[in-house]
Image: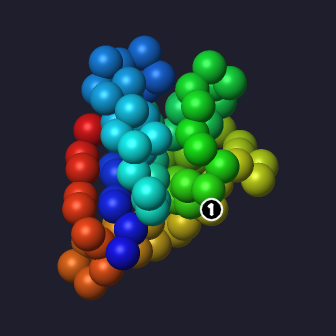
Amino acid sequence: MPDIFLLTKTQNSSRTGICLNLIERSKNSKLYLAGDGVYNLLSNSIKIPPEVTIFVCKEDLDARGLKISNKAIVLEDFYEKLAEEVMEESNKVYSF
């Protein structure tokens, strides 16, 4: 079962650093980016392991005028998918 990480902070936040450190230590994780967390996909300075599945909220991308290519799975039903993961499958849930 995957560890679920919800990140709503920019790459400059100390909370983002904590989140990314925990993801590196996790054996199986999924990262959900919402709010200002979507900006993390623009930065090459953050290191997200390639085996981590990244989901991003389409509404938050659109609100910030961002276009993301193949770095993440863009979800229109982001919060519904996140709630399903948390309720049904997750081992641990972290929110930053």
Q: Secondary structure at mark 1?
A: strand
Say how many tags the image has.
1
Q: Where does label 1 land, which residue?
A: 73
Q: Quadrant of residue 91?
A: bottom left
Quadrant where the N terminus lies? bottom left
Q: Quadrant of residue 15?
A: top left
**Residue sticking out furthest to the right:** 69
Q: Is residue 25 visible?
A: yes
Q: How is the image coloured?
A: rainbow
Query: Where is 62 relative to 74, above or below?
Result: above
Residue drawn at x 42%, y 35% as measured from the top left: 20
Give residue 3's position: percent from left, percent from top.
34, 61
Give residue 2's position: percent from left, percent from top.
38, 68
Give residue 84's position: percent from left, percent from top.
31, 79
In the rendered view, does 73 fall on the left or right side of 77? right
In the rendered view, does 36 fall on the left or right side of 46? left
Quadrant where the C terminus lies? top left
Query: Where is 54 relative to 42, above or below?
Result: below
In the rendered view, does 60 fall on the left or right side of 45? left
Residue drawn at x 35%, y 19% as measured from the top left: 13
The three-letter amino acid code for the residue at tag 1 is: Ile
In the rendered view, does 41 fall on the left or right side of 11? right
